[in-house]
Amino acid sequence: AISYYLLQYQYSNRNKASCYYLRWGDYSSRCTGLRMGKKSRSSKKSKAANNGHSRVPLVSDINSNLSASSFTPPSFAAELPQPAEGWARELRKLEKELRDTHYQDAAIVLSAAKAARIMRQFDVLEKILTKAESKGVEIEDQKLWAQLNEDVAALKRVKTSVRSDSMKQIINGVMKEGMNVDKVAFEDSTFIGMNCLQFAATRGDVQLMEQFIKMGAALDFEASEMPYFSGIVQKPKECTALLLAVNGAITTRNVMSVVARGGMGGMGGRFGGGEARETYEGCVECAIQLVRLGADTSVTFQFPPGCENHPIYQTWHVWKLEGKSVRDVASLVGSDLFEKTVEEFSKMEHQIEHVNCRCGSRLPWKLCHAGKPTDPYYLADKNDEKGVSKVKWRYSPLAPCHCSTSHSRLGDPAETKKIHFKCCWDETAHREYYQCDKTSEIRVMARMANTPFHREALNSMNKIMQGKSEEEISKYMENAQQMMNDPEVVIASRCKIIREGGSLGMQTIVTGDNPCSKLCSWDSEVYAGIMETMDPDLSFCWKDVHWTLPKAELLKRVSEWNEALEQYCDNIGLNGSEREDVIKLHTASEFAPCGNVNCDKMETSVKQFKKCSRCFSVAYCSPACQKADWKYHKKNWCRPGTRERQTDGTPAGRTLQEMLANFG
């Protein structure tokens, strides 16, 4: 709409000295419905003064007021030590301490308020400020306390749609009802068929855009095309939220320039007054933040089919935007900060190191939700596939966890909708979720739990490396890392050991010498064949002793294993009674046995048996069975003073050397 009014102003005032003329050139014949009268003497003089050409709109003198401080933590953050596990876990810990102390401890209240402000969790910050004041907590640093209150008030003064009733319904649908945020389409007064991020970026609504990204919206996803309606134009072809934000910034900037010079009758409102400035700054801020989050800056301006002559797109001809990328037109935005950000984040090394977490904190992943060394936050694709993001970033930690969605699919409506960070994020989880920003698809990677058994393997590797040169160690570790990062290589290695070792191979890779496991009676060839049938990224070793697996993960694995079993039987052509026997023996069950080897009881409902409260490694059907098994359990599983969870079925007292020695 802004482009349309700018163009109409330029058309209707092309003979006035105060306007900025379009260079018609080859585009004059494309514009219809305009009457061209005789040229006045003044226009002829103007044309002669410009070497026979009408003037192109000048580069605007209006520039963005945004500074780097808008994208960095508050000044007091520099005086605080960086939390060892990132600000997200620090805030979660402080919130727990607030609840434990009932908001009575002034030091904890102030620390939590600082952490919430650094994380830009303004709803949490407001809650802390309100409760502390209601309980009469006395804060010594009143200046900082007043500044925190002002920050909350300043955020509320910004015009945004995020607090509207319609947006609240959408947010509730995504967070609690399983609605896909990328499938929500919006109709604007200008374009049709926009997704949520495109809608927010077009309006320069930063708070709305960051709210959608928190909920898991893909940055470069293009919404599906919708039927054309009169008065509404199709959005640019293959556009993204970043492209629309840049387009809005360039257009609004030029409109403000025209109005500032007395054009359009010096009109105010959304074109010449404060609203235009707010829209412009909002579009610039949206564009900068999208780049900092990892949006693709190589996307180009392309006309939608049949819309080249529409007034909205005529300005693209004038500014020669067609075919140019966001990087190419960065200087037209009028923000040195945007140009610098685009240049820096176009380098892959800088992007991976400094890309922002998707929780809205505007902090790098390593300082926010990926503060632990065991927190991966990106996945680089080896294949340069068209239409797919080269780097897939970790799924938003504040979005609904995908395992919650699967609960309802598996018929467990009692499960609550937890956010990803509070559910399946930590290293105790068994899957990692990465998002392709171009397709919005979620890629799931199986995660190997970091258990004492695996730490023992690392210690053994360190002993092997003793006495070797740095170059030899570096080369060895690089080769080992490449192999471990390739799921197909890992699966092939496991299957080779299982096939060649038989029951001993099954014991080494699968059962871990657990006396309660019955898997040694399974056919090792069938077991390896099922593993090879599964998706390498999600392949796992099925264990019938699955006391430590979370319920949602257990149900997923049961379903995936049994589907792979059916597929394996189809692949080798098993039919009749032989197929029935194979399926009966190798079907995965969600019910676990009692941890007492002398007890034959099995669960009759999922997670029925209670786990040892000391180690959380073994479950028993009754206290009597736990007592009867205590001598063996204490020696082999339950390490005094630890609560580490054994997730690979390997007794804590069993060393890697012993396992390998037995196998040899």
Image: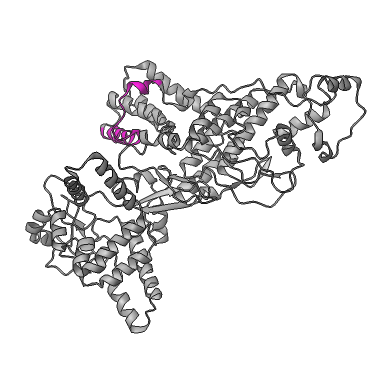
**Residue 268, image quadrant:** top right
Residue 608 at x, y percent in the picture: 24, 61
The residue that appears at 77% across and 42% down in the rendered structure is 309
Residue 605 visible to an observer of this rendering:
no
| 350 sits left or right of 228 in the view | left
The rendered magenta stretch, by its main secondary structure, is classed as helix
Q: Is residue 649 above or below residue 229?
A: below
Residue 579: image quadrant is bottom left
Q: Is residue 545 magenta?
A: no
Tell me what residue is drawn at x 16 percent, y 63 percent: 663
Q: Which picture quadrant has residue 82?
A: top left
Q: Which quadrant is home to the C terminus? A: bottom left
Question: Residue 306, position in %: x, y?
Answer: 74, 48
Rendering coords of residue 19 (x, y %): 78, 22
The quadrant of the rendering that contains the N terminus is top right
| 218 sits left or right of 366 in the view | right
Q: Residue at x 36, y 26 (%)?
A: 114
Q: Most extreme residue toward the bottom, as rendered? A: 577
Regarding residue 579, the answer to whether it shows in the image is yes
Residue 60's place in the image compared with 538, above or below, is above
Residue 327 lies left or right of residue 506; in this view the side is right
Q: Residue at x 17, y 50 (%)?
A: 615
Number of disc labels? 0
Q: Position of residue 504 (x, y in %)?
A: 18, 66
Give the answer, above or below, for where 446 lies relative to 96: below
- Left or right relative to 182: residue 48: right
Q: Is residue 97 magenta?
A: yes
Q: Nearer the viewer, residue 133 or 93?
A: 93
**Looking at the image, which residue sits at the far left?**
631
Find the magenta span and give its range: 75-100
Q: Give the colouring mode of the picture.
A: one colour
Q: Nearer the viewer, residue 16 or 614?
A: 16
